[in-house]
Image (tube, rainbow, N blue to C red):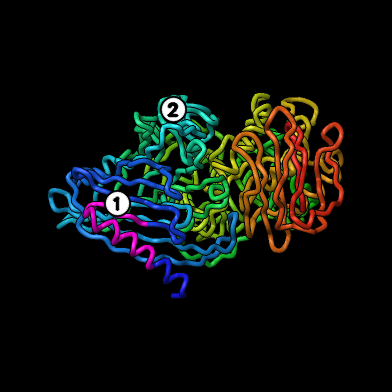
Amino acid sequence: MGNQQMKRWFLAMFCFTAALAPRAQELHVKGPDGRLDVVLSVAEGRPAYEVRYNGKVFLEKSPLGLNTTIGDFSCGLKLMDHRIKMITEDYTLNRSKHSQVHYEASELVATFANTEKQAMDIIFRVSNHDVAFCYALPRQGGRAALAVQQEYTGFRFPLQTTTFLTPQSRAMTGWKRTKPSYEEPYKADMPMDAPSAYGNGYTFPGLFRIGREGWVLVSETGVDSRYCASRLSEYQSGGLYQIAFPMAAENDGNGTVAPAFALPGRTPWRTLTVGETLKPVVETTVPWDVVKPLYETRHRYHWGRGTWSWILWQDQSINYNDQVAYIDLAAAMGYEYVLVDNWWDQNIGRQRMASLVKYAQSRKVDVFLWYSSSGYWNDIEQGPVNRMDNPIVRKREMQWLQSLGVKGIKVDFFGGDKQETMRLYEAILSDADDHGLMVIFHGATLPRGWERMYPNYAGSEAVLASENMVFTQAACDQEAFNACLHPFIRNTVGCMEFGGSFLNKRLNRGNNGGSERRSSDAFQLAVAVLFQNPVQFFALAPNNLTDAAPVSLGFMKEVPSTWDETRYIDGYPGKYVVLARRQGSRWYIAGINARQQAVQLKLDLSLLAGQRVELITDGPQKAPAAHRTTISKNGIFEITLQPGGGFVIR
């Protein structure tokens, strides 16, 4: 342990001992730099916690506890013991916004006993800007398993807080009764007491602005087959939201609401990212800091970019000849993959699919194939169906895919957060890894640490994605607003397979009808940087090879899909955003504007100070314009962003 780490250790020890001296039922644990402070307390037998940053309250005293089938751990509790240690870990994350992560945190394990003398630990990990906590239970006498009937975990915000949230939909609604699928619109800067759209609370993550003090991002991570995925409840009095379990009707009533696990066992981690600015929110790695890989793989997976016909050419394009056209497009762009979407089993067939895969490989392009997750809990008829939900059929199918040389699958239409559904996600991923297949999920839940947990996981939709722009003009009109939210909320906690970056002006096959894109080409190029997913299928079309601006095509040919470093530069959720991402030695700076008027920005680009760069921005009639420029020696860079416009620097 180095001198600096030793100092931090003594600081943490001091915080604990100082708190225990005057009040035996209160503990403090601080992050390594001492600014983030979590206070764990027990009053009248009920545990609670509070979060402060630089002495200011970001989360008021909030409830903790579980009620389980073997005992109640929410009241009548007494703090029996605690232990602390410093956590230091360096790990590699090759599919997200930082490839090399150094994690330091203070860990508190506080042991409580209920009136029946049953034990429960509450574990807190506190880094400089992140809090993660979970509940751990040992075997209780002869009992080796439990179900959690209710989790009392809450988040009580100061009353000046405003919210950036997306509602949980009603179960078994939407296309072919497939919701919830994390595809509802966000509302920005709303008062806490504004009810959600459907009365079912909100999906993770949730962003909260604590007046002028700063920001808190709330989410969860480490969800696997041993628990359900959770959400935030409706607002309750006094600034409180609580953990809510899935709705009983999800997945057509199949599966229990209450999660269960073997003992000893633990719940997933609830996470908070706290900052006086949005920088810690954008740059957080907490979803991966507190989880571990669940299995090793013998395969080497290659992340990359791809094309897919369905987004613009729709179902009618799932035929052999159109897929050849998109394979040729991928080859011309230097992309690694093509995605063949729904109905391929009927419109191309299994025998001709072998021929199509061979043709793609002859063009140095590999293939992803679409599947429905099931057929027994929704009304989906798009094929292939009933192949991913049954382990015998699934393994047989994956063996066939491997024999063809298919590299990945996109599995769609899950529609639920119950533990039963989490088991299906994990089973698909595990079986797919046995056969060297990457997996993308659509119509799906938020990924919760999965980039580190599952080596073949290649992304999730879980957002109101590009297809909605094809379906409705309203989605095109709202594109800039939504795009200025995701880097601060949805995409900061997990990869996001959006399927965007259109270069068509009109969103149909002929580029001559349907919805009209309001944003500029430079905006679309910026989105390719701002939205992160390890395998990203862009919404390009074969006609773009001749009708798109050469500068746009040139940028889209070389933009990466994975990054070594991500930095927040400037922005405000729903208004504008500027991020910097690095792959290797090359930086990409991207910005977009959702306001109705131009915005003048004075950016600190110290990371490029004095360097000669290429700038692509909006020219006349929103045409992309590229030129070389030099960043000043002090790193200050000024630019004007037009409404619906953007820029990229490389």
Q: CA distance from mark 2 to mark 1?
A: 27 Å
Residue range corresponding to the magenta coloring: 10-29
Circle 2: element type: loop
Q: Percent from the top left, x then y, of residue 31?
A: 43, 58
Task: Name the residue located 55 percent from the left edge and 61 percent from the top edge.
Answer: 93
Mark 1, other Cα within 10 Å: few <14 / some 14–19 / many ≥20: some
Residue 226 visible? The answer is no
Q: Percent from the top left, x then y, of residue 406?
A: 62, 55
Q: Percent from the top left, x then y, of residue 473?
A: 68, 24
Disc 2 target residue = 170
Q: Please state which of residues 235 and 38 is positioned toward the viewer in this rendering.
A: 38
Q: Please state which of residues 210 and 472 is positioned toward the viewer in this rendering.
A: 210
Residue 14 lies in the magenta-colored region: yes
Residue 557 visible? The answer is yes
Q: Please state which of residues 54 and 432 is positioned toward the viewer in this rendering.
A: 54
Label 2 vs 1, first from the N-terminus: 2
Mark 2, other Cα within 10 Å: few <14 / some 14–19 / many ≥20: some
Residue 437 lies in the magenta-colored region: no
Q: Amino acid at mark 2?
A: Arg
Left or right, 531 with reference to 161: right
Q: Which mark is residue 261?
A: 1
Task: Name the residue located 58 percent from the left edge and 55 percent from the top edge.
Answer: 96
**Figure label count:** 2
Q: Quadrant of residue 504?
A: top right
Circle 1: element type: strand
Task: Name the residue located 68 percent from the left edge and 30 percent from the top edge.
Answer: 595
Q: Please state which of residues 376 and 242 is positioned toward the viewer in this rendering.
A: 242
Q: Percent from the top left, x then y, of residue 287?
A: 48, 52
